[in-house]
Amino acid sequence: MSEDTENEQPEEEQTADNVEPEQTPADEEDDAVPQEGADEPLMGPEASDDELELLQGGDGLAELQDVIADLNDKLLRAVAETENVRRRAQRDKEDASKYAIQSFAAEMVSVADNLGRALDSVDSTTRDSDEAVDNLCTGVEMTQRELLNTFERVGIKLIEAEGQRFDHNLHEAMFEMEDPDKPTGTVVQVIQAGYTIRDRLLRPAKVGVSKGGPKAAPEDAAQPPESDATTDESEGAAKAYEAPNQTGSQLDEEL
């Protein structure tokens, strides 16, 4: 009898474990109330009234589009300005590299001038009669030629002025010379050679300019067209050249 009682007790306990607890009215009321903020859109805690108005209605959308357009315009301008600054910096860097030797070159062209003066000081008769002088002049000529070749390699070029039309960008007029056979404003004599370094003027050529001849053609005077017409000086005909603004000096009208 006692054994049957002991076997029945576990079955009663198992049945009690499977029975779910009944919900109280308070629990059912809690389940029926939705959680606060479950279906509301997420808004930042710092959202202002103006931002809320922009998100509501057509007027707010139009204002927002205007703001976007304004910001886009400012962005494009900033990008363009940055690109301009980059290009200017690149150009300055290239110029610094191209013209780094400009001051040194301005001093070296004086050496070429002195070599030319040394050769001009010896006439052909002296060279023919004295072998030592001739050998010395030959050495000076070789040195001058090598110096000019070096100038060419680094971008320094001699200005070919004689016979060319006067150009105030390259020439400095020192005097006028009467020459009816050459067009007015033609370079007839070079007193000091001029040089350019790449696309810049290193030193203007000091020259003498013709006057009294036929009027110079508008083209380059290196190949002037043949003309028998003369300039009427009594009527004050315009000169074929003009005084330089920066380099050179103003030509004396009385010469």
Image: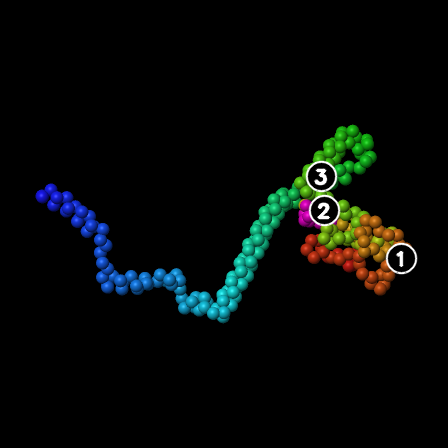
- Dots 1, 3 in contact, CB < 8 A: no
Q: Is residue 157 visible?
A: yes
Residue indicated by mark 2: 194
Q: Amino acid at mark 2?
A: Gly
Residue 193 occupies quadrant: top right
Q: Horizontally, is 188 left or right of 156 in the view?
A: right
Residue 241 occupies quadrant: bottom right
Quick one: which residue is furthest to the right in this view? 228
**Residue 104, placed above or below residue 251:** above
Q: CA distance from mark 1 to mark 3?
A: 40 Å
Which residue sits at x=59%, y=47%? Answer: 93
55 vs 181, nearest the viewer: 55
Instruction: Say which quadrant the C terminus sits in.
Output: bottom right
Residue 187 covered by magenta stretch: no
Q: Horizontally, is 193 left or right of 182 in the view?
A: left
The local secondary structure at tag 1 comes to loop
The local secondary structure at tag 2 comes to loop
Residue 199 covered by magenta stretch: yes
Mark 2, Cα crowd under 10 Å, few <14 / some 14-19 / many 20+, is many
Residue indicated by mark 1: 229
Q: Is residue 81 visible?
A: no
Which residue sits at x=17%, y=49%? Answer: 12
- Dots 3, 2 in contact, CB < 8 A: no
- Which of marks 1 and 2 precedes in the sequence? 2
- Number of numbered callouts drawn: 3
Mark 1, Cα crowd under 10 Å, few <14 / some 14-19 / many 20+, is few
Residue indicated by mark 3: 148
- Which of marks 3 and 1 precedes in the sequence? 3
